[in-house]
Amino acid sequence: MSDVHTRDVLLESLLPQYQAEGFEVFLNPSPSILPPFMHEYRPDAVALRPDRKIAIEVVRPSETSSRKVQDIKSLFAPHSDWELRVFYVSSSVTEKALDVVSREAIRSSIDRLRALKSAGHFLPALIMAWATLEGVGRALLPESLKRPQTPRRLVGVLAEAGYVTPEEADWLRAAISLRNEAVHGRVDLTVDENQLDRFVEVLETLIGFLPDGRVPTA
């Protein structure tokens, strides 16, 4: 598993906790929202609330990373209005590459998604929509998306490859928090039918990029 992917997985797992505490979380924050003392340092994420500001750094345990963390702590020491949180990830865990599913399987998944929506099962339909998005994304970009993906990285890779428009990417990113709440136990969520319709439109566009009867190979 790549360092970038491991970091993204951890950051995505932290989002629900910080959001539940009232923070607005920015992954890979733009310099425009960072204070001047961070002009040469960009944390992996920041969590902002009127009464608290937290910078989040993700590192692998090593002698080099230990020195890096000490340098970052020194940077933050004079700034009591900011808190630094460091999370360590192990390099011992690897994830198996996932198989690419067929175009027919993706079409069947979209049809089941439509059936769930028609029956009024909006929350299960939302979960299936995200699963289908990763399935069709992996079929389109088997090398880039061969590992399990965080929603944010999945959308980013599809956008960078030109398969979703900037507007669609922004809309999908905005929908990630609802997806995260659903998969982490918020079974009481209300899902907008129009949101599902828009998701289906995106999936229909993506499946249209796949050749009939087969999926592209790496």
Image (cartoon, grey):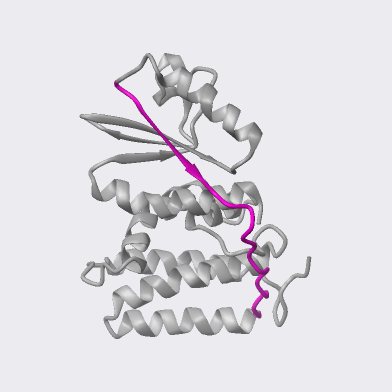
Question: Percent position (x, y) of residue 93?
Answer: 61, 60
Q: Is residue 92 above or below residue 34?
A: below
Q: Viewer-proximal residue, 216 or 34? A: 34
Q: Nearer the viewer, residue 18 or 188?
A: 18
Q: Is residue 147 left or right of residue 17?
A: right
- Magenta segment includes 85: yes
Q: Is residue 95 magenta?
A: yes
Q: Is residue 33 left or right of residue 97?
A: left
**Which quadrant of the figure has residue 1?**
bottom right
Q: Position of residue 85 (x, y in %)?
A: 41, 36
Residue 165 makes an appearance in the image: no
- Residue drawn at x 35%, y 55% as measured from the top left: 177
Q: Which quadrant does the C terminus fall into? A: bottom right
Magenta-tinted stretch: 81-102
Instruction: From this view, report whether residue 212 is shown above or below residue 197.
Output: below
Image location (x, y in percent) of residue 117: 33, 79
Image spot of residue 174 (x, y percent): 37, 51
Residue reaching furthest to the front = 63
Horizontally, residue 164 falls left or right of residue 111, namely right
* Residue at figure coordinates x 33%, y 65% from the top left: 184
Count of labels in the image: 0
Q: Which quarter of the figure has residue 139?
A: bottom right
Q: Measuring 27% from the left and 66% from the top, which residue is drawn there? A: 192
One can see residue 35 in this view: yes
Q: Is residue 156 above or below residue 96?
A: above
Main SS, magenta region, reads loop
What residue is drawn where x is 31% and y is 51%? 17
